[in-house]
Image (spheres, coloured by chain):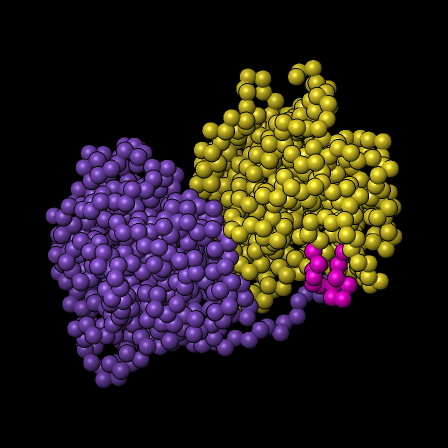
Chain colours: A purple, B yellow
């Protein structure tokens, strides 16, 4: 009866995040993948297992200790894998978790999208629309309490950005009642995708329109966090904790930790439950203001080495953000603090008042803080804190996206690649740009909003 | 025990809504049971049996076969985690349990959104709640009323609770219909809590006979200042609520100096006028665990005078609560009497004392409480203040007093809620989240009008 989530991993980046996600998700449920799981009593929370996994026989998760057990019970991840190129998905097919993925939920072997949002979104989007809907529906039919989709993709390239946002639209059409959370990776600007500014702008606009909430990360922040972890003593342990060799793996683990903390309240019990459905009610004061800056404490990865977490934490600090912005520099429209593990209500109240003191909240909601306490800590830590902030600083982030786009569009560079795609026309560039600037304007207006002088109702 | 059947009192069915309602309800029943089976009642065996019978039949089902008490309660939630956890906890409890069949559980949660709870989840759950309630009530020989427990911050307790209460109250219009509403921390628990609280207050105001308001901030202060807690958990807040409610609603007795009162009597007494239906419960003493055994028990007259102090307001700025006497231990040092001393104007006050050794000669609380200025002129003096007593020790304490009070102070928390909700509303913030489930802006305006009217009425009591 727990809330269930289906991950939708699109493109190379999305599937790389996915490949970091599943081993860590299994670890949270006490199932060892490649390395030993810290011995925590998790058998009380067997129900939670079904949030991310489905099993044909309704055996409670208690009996699962290893991948072998999962295989025998025909347990499958609630995951839909979509990629144009076969390479990443192929790794799932051959990797140690191969039995965890249902072949019928993989969509692959298509030609690439040439780093072209329009090709991914319009050409592939319409060509594979029915295939995508079928696959997602198949996954949805295996759930009883489907609560949300967790979409993962990058917005710099063509497949994740284009097809990922096309998938998002399809989900909005076919499953309007199910929340759509998107975690997407923004390029740092040093990647070799020339057309990234176009892809980023076009994708961002779809995200603003169709996602329930967006939990963005950018490569620059992720790299900085990795560098910071490497410089710390205990990081040797932390770095080793993620087995694979790919440099992106570490960065992806940071995103995964965020996602696991984000969903913990929906999966595990706690004295102040936070269901995923509550996030958008609390965090999105106006339509389209659905991007949330995520900050984590501790930043280190799960490992056998237990890291102490101080009572006084600052997940809202600039260098703890997955996005390169300083949320407290702007006006805070809303905030959520989710704590897991050994955190008391008093600790939580203390952190709330510290955030109140540090942040500048909007005059029409000075107490816009949502709090959650989940009793199950993440694997490897006694506690963890996640902050979600809706700050007008995000307006600056969008301005940057608009600026990058304008710089290239002014020269009409590469636009012919986009214009030749059926279904895409120059007006889509212009409309998307306008819509993005409208949102930027809304943030600016909110950053300067004054206390309302409107008198309260007088009753006779 | 069957020989005491004649003492069976009226039954009260509790509906627990949402995470908070269920956790508070569980704490209340645990406290009731602890009190019922307390080893040192301090009264005769016969009198204690009478108390136990009366308490059991009020809160628990009569069942011959089982050696466990079964709570007269319906558990309602929009997701199963909390109720599952409670039932799991209960399975190892040897004294009492919930009836597993009396649960109405939806799925997906109510998203901290009153509109989602009220417009969607409430209607989905109505039938199963009504059915569970009917089954519970049929087990009662005589039903006195329904007590709903909910918080106002989230979506389930507030929205689903409002919808269900609104839709069942006609069926029980001849019964006592009251509720306990937990108000969130003002610094924020849920971003939309002001909207949810406003909408809930407006609904319960219309449908219930009286509403007990419980403020998390205040309970938290009691734990920090009075009980010297370093770390306060949700369950600690709930334990204070449970003490206040058990201390007020456990059986009382008629004595030479005080009348007997049932829960229904208390509710109708505390809300004698349709414009004044919010009340609170002040209680004392709350003694830190570590100093319990050293604490000399104070005199009854000191305790009752202390209770009286709790109605004091800071005369220099009426809107701030500078001295909160509930956050102090009763002391024999008389409080300095200031000429400007003022008290909150009360529509009704009920002092409930529990414990041995109280006689009329020893203390006359009505002396202290019945100063004319403290009550509106239209309240007859005999209705303005009532003292009730129970000689049995409560909660293993020699003395415990609850002041059930309906006074003008309540306008302060209500005003804070409206102030915050109004600010958001004038900026149209979060409205799209509510209108998407069919709530209209007019519905908000109606709620504002209703609660502004209540605030005005309470505020003007003290003018």
Furthest-bottom residue in this view: A411
Furthest-front residue in this view: B294
Residue A127 highlighted magenta (yes or no): no
Q: Quadrant of residue B439?
A: bottom right
Magenta part, dominant SS:
loop
Residue visible at 45% across and 76% down? Answer: A444
Please tell me whether residue B52 is drawn above or below residue A447 in the rendered image.
above
Please tell me whether residue B115 is drawn above or below residue B425 in the rendered image.
above
Q: Along the line of sight, which residue is nearer the eye, A320 or A179?
A: A320
Q: Which residues are magenta?
A: B312-324
Residue B314 highlighted magenta (yes or no): yes
Residue B285 coordinates in the image, percent (x, y)? 68, 44
Residue visible at 69% across and 45% down? Answer: B284
Residue A53 coordinates in the image, percent (x, y)? 28, 42
Image quadrant containing the C terminus of chain B? bottom right
Residue visible at 38% across and 46% down? Answer: A376
Q: Along the line of sight, which residue is nearer the eye, B426 or A118?
A: B426
């Amino acid at each position: 009866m727990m809330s269930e989530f289906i991950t939708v991993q699109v493109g190379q980046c999305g599937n790389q995040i996915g490949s970091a996600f599943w081993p860590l998700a299994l670890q949270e449920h006490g199932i060892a993948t490649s390395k030993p799981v810290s011995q925590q009593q998790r058998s009380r929370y067997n129900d939670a297992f079904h949030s991310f996994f489905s099993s044909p026989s309704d055996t409670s998760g208690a009996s699962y200790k290893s991948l072998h057990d999962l295989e025998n019970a025909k347990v499958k991840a609630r995951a839909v894998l979509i990629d144009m190129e076969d390479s990443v998905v192929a790794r799932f097919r051959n990797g140690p978790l191969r039995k965890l993925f249902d072949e019928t939920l993989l969509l692959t072997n298509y030609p690439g999208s040439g780093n072209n949002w329009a090709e991914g979104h319009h050409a592939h989007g319409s060509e594979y629309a029915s295939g995508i809907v079928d696959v997602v529906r198949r996954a949805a039919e295996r759930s009883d309490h489907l609560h949300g989709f967790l979409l993962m993709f990058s917005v710099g390239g063509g497949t994740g950005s284009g097809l990922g946002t096309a998938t998002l639209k399809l989900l909005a059409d076919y499953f309007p009642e199910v929340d759509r959370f998107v975690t997407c990776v923004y390029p740092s600007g040093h990647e070799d995708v020339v057309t990234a500014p176009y892809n980023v702008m076009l994708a961002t606009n779809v995200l603003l329109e169709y996602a329930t909430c967006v939990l963005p990360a950018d490569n620059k922040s992720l790299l900085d966090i990795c560098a910071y972890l490497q410089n710390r003593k205990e990081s040797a342990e932390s770095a080793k904790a993620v087995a694979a060799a790919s440099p992106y793996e570490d960065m992806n683990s940071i995103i995964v930790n965020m996602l696991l903390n984000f969903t913990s309240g929906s999966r595990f019990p706690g004295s102040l439950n936070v269901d995923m459905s509550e996030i958008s009610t609390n965090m999105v004061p106006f339509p389209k203001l659905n991007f949330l800056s995520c900050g984590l404490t501790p930043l280190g990865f799960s490992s056998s080495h237990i890291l102490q977490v101080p009572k006084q934490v600052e997940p809202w600090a600039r260098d703890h953000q997955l996005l390169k912005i300083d949320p407290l520099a702007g006006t805070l429209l809303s905030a959520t603090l989710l704590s897991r593990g050994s955190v008391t209500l008093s600790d939580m109240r203390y952190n709330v008042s510290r955030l109140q003191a540090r942040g500048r909240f909007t005059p029409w909601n000075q107490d816009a803080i949502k709090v959650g306490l989940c009793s199950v800590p993440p694997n490897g830590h006694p506690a963890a804190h996640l902050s979600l902030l809706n700050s007008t600083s995000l307006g600056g982030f969008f301005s940057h996206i608009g600026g990058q786009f304008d710089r290239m569009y002014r020269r009409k560079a590469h636009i012919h690649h986009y214009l030749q795609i059926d279904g895409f026309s120059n007006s889509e560039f212009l409309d998307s740009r306008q819509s993005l600037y409208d949102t930027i304007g809304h943030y600016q207006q909110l950053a300067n909003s004054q206390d309302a002088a409107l008198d309260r109702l007088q009753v006779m | 025990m069957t020989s005491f059947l004649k003492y069976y009192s009226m039954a009260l069915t509790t509906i627990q809504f949402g995470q908070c309602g269920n956790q508070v309800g569980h704490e209340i029943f645990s406290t009731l049971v602890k009190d019922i089976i307390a080893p040192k009642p301090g009264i005769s065996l016969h009198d204690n049996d009478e108390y136990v019978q009366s308490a059991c039949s009020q809160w628990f089902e009569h069942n011959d076969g089982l050696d466990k008490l079964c709570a007269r309660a319906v558990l309602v939630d929009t997701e199963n985690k909390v109720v599952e956890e409670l039932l799991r906890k209960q399975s190892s409890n040897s004294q009492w349990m919930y009836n597993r069949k009396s649960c109405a559980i939806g799925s997906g949660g109510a998203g901290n959104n009153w509109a989602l709870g009220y417009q969607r989840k409430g209607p989905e759950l109505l039938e199963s709640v009504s059915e569970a309630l009917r089954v519970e009530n049929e087990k009662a020989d005589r039903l006195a009323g329904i007590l709903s427990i909910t918080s106002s911050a989230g979506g389930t307790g507030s929205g689903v609770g409002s919808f269900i209460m609104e839709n069942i109250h006609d069926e029980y219009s001849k019964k006592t219909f009251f509720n306990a509403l937990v108000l969130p921390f003002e610094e924020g628990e849920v971003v939309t809590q002001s909207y949810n609280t406003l909408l809930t207050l407006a609904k319960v105001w219309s449908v219930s006979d009286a509403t007990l308001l419980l403020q998390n901030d205040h309970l938290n202060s009691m734990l920090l200042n009075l009980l010297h807690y370093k770390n306060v958990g949700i369950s600690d807040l709930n334990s204070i609520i449970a003490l206040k409610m058990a201390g007020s609603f456990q059986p009382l007795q008629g004595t030479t100096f005080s009348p007997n009162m049932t829960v229904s009597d208390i509710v109708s007494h505390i809300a004698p006028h349709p414009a004044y239906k919010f009340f609170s419960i002040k209680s004392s003493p709350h003694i830190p665990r570590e100093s319990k055994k050293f604490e000399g028990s104070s005199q009854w007259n000191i305790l009752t005078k202390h209770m009286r102090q709790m109605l004091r307001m800071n005369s220099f700025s009426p809107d701030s609560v500078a001295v909160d006497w509930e956050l102090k231990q009763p002391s024999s040092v008389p409080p300095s009497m200031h000429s400007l001393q003022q008290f909150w104007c009360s529509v009704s006050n009920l002092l409930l004392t529990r414990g041995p050794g109280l006689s009329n000669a020893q203390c006359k609380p009505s002396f202290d409480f019945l100063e004319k200025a403290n009550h509106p002129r239209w309240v007859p003096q005999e209705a303005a203040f009532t003292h009730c007593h129970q000689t049995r020790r409560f909660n293993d304490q020699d003395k415990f007093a609850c002041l059930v009070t309906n006074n003008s102070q309540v306008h302060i928390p209500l005003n804070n809620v409206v102030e915050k909700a109004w600010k958001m509303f004038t900026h149209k913030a979060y409205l799209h989240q509510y209108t998407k489930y069919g709530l209209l802006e007019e519905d908000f305006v109606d709620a504002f009008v209703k609660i502004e009217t209540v605030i005005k009425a309470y505020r003007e009591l003290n003018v």
